[in-house]
Image: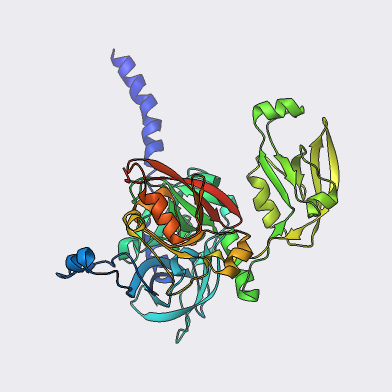
Amino acid sequence: MCKHLIAALALCAPLAVLAQGRDLPDFADLAEKQAPAVVNISTTSTMHGQQAAPPGAEEDPFFDFFRRFGPPQPRDYEARSLGSGFIISQDGYLLTNAHVVEAADEITVRLNDKREYKARVIGTDKRTDVAVLKIEPSGPLPTVSIGDPNKLRVGEWVVAIGSPFGFDSTVTAGIVSAKGRSLPQENFVPFLQTDVAINPGNSGGPLFNLKGEVIGINSMIFSRTGGFMGVSFAIPIDVAIDVARQLQSSGRVSRGRIGVVIQEVTKELADSFGLPKAAGALVNSVEKGGPADKAGIAPSDVIVKFDNKEIGSSNELPRIVAATRPGSKVSVQVWRKGERKDLQLTVGETPEERAAAKRQPGKKPSGEALAKLGLTVSELSAEQRRELNVAGGVLVETADGIAARAGIRRGDVILAVGNQEVKSADDLNRFLASGDKSRTVALLVRRGDSSIYVPLRINGN
């Protein structure tokens, strides 16, 4: 028995040594060195016209009286929001999320040492949610080092520094959960997924590797409660830097397009087309006269290579095409009638962001049903309807509460409720107020260049 015990201890000894050699990492030096280049960003914007009550209004002793018995009174109030960012140059250029500074009238940047500066927006890109800001410091500022997210491995430790709920220089840590995540309506970013604790106020802050290099911008979380639930997403820094350089040089981002509508290749579809494996992007329609049409791409083709890059799944193609400079001549390989065919294509350019998100101050009709759902909307101008090629619809100015939890965002255009076309804010309020209050309705929402149905449960349960 003793011999067996001794043998067991002998086997355990190497494991004990191994465990000692794998202590958890110490993030103290990283946090101390990098925190000075991470900033708190606070914004203010004036909301015009009739609104849902601003925060704190319910504390006014006359608020309930006028809400019940008084006529609706247009009122302006100042909305505030918080986010994070980081300094990329000593002369004061910063990166953050576009949604952090969207519609801001004033932006204040506070450094780790409590210095404050007013910032101006150099440019924003909604499609990647990246914004470049500029402050005017009196001397050189601390900056971050930029890393290579392509070298990251799933399971590596990563660290976030930001201002969740306004708490400056908060450090949280976790691991890389996945790479290249594709999210609904976010086709241009191969997100890094982590389990780092990210909460409201962290948006726009840096995600570091253990070398202290920024490898991502913390952008969003998956949550059923509004708070952190273990799944957060970051924009890879190489994507953000490419966008930032274009914004700094020209004020806009140029992206490639080829004019096709694609879908995922399932195992069943692969079998039906004779593909050896379920990979590539199946073309189900081609824009007449577009780059793909001119190159000879046809419906039912499966794009398996673009610019010599293998297309593993359909969601990879939009990213690769968008990252290709317009005017570039590239090779495209398609699977057609049981064999591969090589084509040559000249990449076109994606139109700039539509005008749907332009603000229309002072023009925000609302109603009781909309207010209960956390929605404030405005009617589209003739120019906006023309640019979007729609006859009606209303622009979402604010989305909070039930609407935000359902996935409605500021800048969306609501075109219909079920099969009922929305032509005005009054239409939308009436459709939402009628019928069973426990029902779920489907809102047809225009977002960017695409339209999706968003299910909205009226009572929010």
Quarter-wise, where is residue 290 in the image? bottom right
Residue 227's spot in the image, x, y percent? Answer: 33, 51
The residue sitting at 14% across, 69% down in the picture is: 61
The quadrant of the picture occupied by the C terminus is top left
Q: Is residue 125 above or below residue 405?
A: below
The residue most toward the left is: 61
| Image-based side of 297 in relation to 133, left or right | right
Occupied quadrant, residue 48: bottom left
Which residue is at 61% across, 56% downward? 449
Name the quadrant of the N terminus: top left
Q: Is 343 left or right of 143, judged from the image as shown?
A: right
Q: Is residue 89 above or below residue 264?
A: below
Is residue 81 visible in the rendered image? The answer is yes
Residue at 36%, 20% in the rendered image: 7
Q: Position of residue 293 (x, y in %)?
A: 81, 50
What is the x, y in percent for residue 384?
Answer: 58, 67
Scheme of colours in the image: rainbow
Q: Where does the image place residue 436, in percent across and percent down from the top left?
A: 34, 41
Q: Residue at x 17, y 67 (%)?
A: 65
Q: How many marks?
A: 0
* Front one among 417 and 161: 417
Q: In the image, is 172 to the left or to the right of 455?
A: left
Q: Out of 406 and 329, give the one closest to the viewer.
A: 406
| Residue found farthest to the bottom | 138
- Residue 196 at least partly seen: no
Image vertical order of residue 217 relative to residue 192, above or below: below
